[in-house]
Amino acid sequence: MYLVISVFIIIVCVLLTLIVLVQNSKGGGLASNFASSNQVMGVRKTADFLEKATWTLAVSLLVLSLLAAFALPRENSEGPRSAIQEKIDNTKDESQTPAFPVGQEQQETEEPVVPK
């Protein structure tokens, strides 16, 4: 499902790029040189269609992006684990370490260490 949505996102991005490049700029620029030739074919209706197509593609890109976020494959808890998590799981519990034997001199003066 995620792969299908990703393909649709790429298609929408390419179409959106092409539609934006086809539109005339509002400030004139290079498009002002070709303004007289565009008047023959009815530029106003073409501009309306391109603007509606731009908004439609932009909204569909937003919706597809949200769908892709929800369809994103999640990791299983049994899948590969990080190295940090493995180190945490493999550390020894400090309360389980045995007490080292001490010499007779120290036994008389100190209390024996008993693990909890």
Image (cartoon, rainbow, N blue to C red):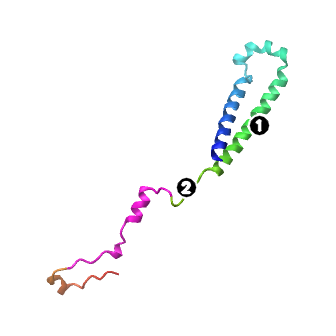
Residue type at mark 1: give it.
Answer: Thr
Residue type at mark 2: give it.
Answer: Glu
Circle 2 packing at 10 Å, graded few (<14), some (14-19), many (20+), is few
Q: Is residue 44 left or right of residue 54?
A: right
| Residue 15 drawn in magenta | no
Q: Which residue is mark 1?
A: 56
Query: Please, is residue 24 above or below residue 82 in the view?
Result: above
Quadrant in the rendering for residue 52: top right
Pick whichever of labels 1 and 2 is earlier in the sequence: 1
- Looking at the rendered structure, the secondary structure element under dot 2 is loop
From the viewer's side, name the closer residue of 53 and 7.
Answer: 7
Residue 39 is tagged as: none
Q: Which residues are magenta?
A: 79-101
Query: Please, is residue 9 above or below residue 82 in the view?
Result: above
Q: Which residue is mark 2?
A: 75
Where residue 18 sits in the image (x, y, percent)? 69, 27
Q: Name the residue at 77% across, 37% down.
A: 56
Quadrant in the rendering for residue 12: top right
Q: Name the residue at 31% across, 74% down.
A: 97
Where residue 40 sits in the image (x, y, percent)? 84, 14
